[in-house]
Image: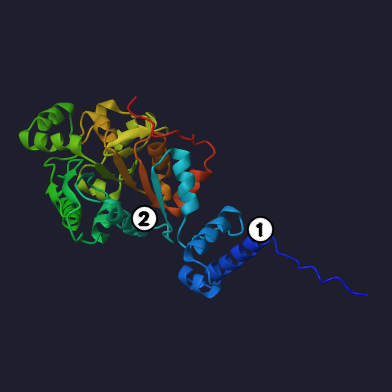
Amino acid sequence: MTLPPPRKIRRLPHDEQSRLMVKIARMYHERGLKQAEIAHELHITQARVSRLLRRAVQSGVVSTVVVSPPGVHTELEEKLENRFGLAEAVVVDTMSSDERDVAQNLGAAAAGYLESTLLGNEVVGISSWSANLLATATFMRSASNPVVTDVVQLVGGVGDPRVQVEANRLLTTFAHATGATPIFLPAPGLLGSAAAQRSLMSDPAVENVSKRWSELTTALVGIGALEPSPLLASSGNGIAVEDQKTLRALGAVGDICLRFFDKDGVLVAPEMDERVIGIRPDQLLAVPRRIAVAGGTRKLGALRGVLLGGWVTVLITDLAAAQELCNDTQARVIEGVRSAAR
């Protein structure tokens, strides 16, 4: 009896494609071979290797998982951005609650952020009397080419001579790092009366600076709590105790460029506004990019208010503050940046 010849079991093309796809994916992702090396080893074209690697991703054979290294808090940053309508958030693990340590760590992070995002032909406004911004300027490395044309003070930088040097150093250090021309606002930040403010704002030296505020592409600001920081208080531009009582009665929780707002970011104290030598709220809100460098538990109420009011588009803050802001069930989610000048 003659046996029939054995059947040939032919592998279906689809099965072969799947086998080859998985094999190539393992060679590329697990063994770390380059596409050209895979093509040479398997005697196929590099174009086919590339095509099958793409198909491996599309079909779910290969999935990508992004693992954040220690000290990187991308997920928390995205929560802040979504909750408060920020263009960007940067969260820093300061490892300490001491305000001086927080300022140094925030300053280092802000310096790195600015070095990456100041791309040239910028006109930057910078507020005075901020330890966080002073640390930022100190940590910035000098750009190989100018990335900022002018840096303009947003709030009067004249104060107690023993402290005024810090406001000047902030501006000159930032200007040196970015290749900018520093433009000083030759006036105190807060005057005793509205009449004095009107007189000084009409002075040609002050007027020449205030005209530049409409040209700003970026504003770099600190956020103040109701109680002034040691630097601001010692400058002579801090809010007096009686004024603090008035502001507290009006519901004020903090300030941006000496403009005080309540827990929802709504401006309060119009009488005090008339005594400020600095950028007006409508001018500040017209700046395309507004970066705040602020943190610490003492400023939580001010941070929440400034975010709810849409005063800034970028926030650089510490881990503890970011977690509190994201865990606050009473904070409203912001759809885009809301105008606070209502």
Q: Which mark is in front, 1 or 2? A: 1
Residue 115's x, y, as percent? Answer: 28, 56
At 55% from the left edge and 70% from the top edge, which residue is drawn? Answer: 27
Indicate left or right for 185 with 329 as reference: left
Residue 33's x, y, as percent? Answer: 50, 72
Name the quadrant containing residue 286: top left
Residue 166's x, y, as percent? Answer: 19, 53
**Which residue is tagged 1?**
14
Under mark 1, the amino acid is His
- Near mark 2 (Cα within 10 A), the count class, few <14, some 14-19 or many ≥20, is some
Instruction: Check residue 99 in the rendering and tell me which mark sits there, or answer none.
Output: 2
Residue 274's x, y, as percent? Answer: 21, 28
Q: Secondary structure at mark 1?
A: helix
Indicate left or right for 205 with 245 as reference: left
Vertical placement of 185 versus 138: above or below? above
State how far apart marks 1 and 2 are (Cα). Answer: 63 Å
Indicate left or right for 236 with 26 as reference: left
Q: How many marks?
A: 2
Under mark 2, the amino acid is Glu
At 14% from the left edge and 34% from the top edge, which residue is drawn? Answer: 211
At 54% from the left edge and 38% from the top edge, which residue is drawn? Answer: 329
Q: Considering depth in this image, is 302 or 293 the residue closer to the camera?
A: 293
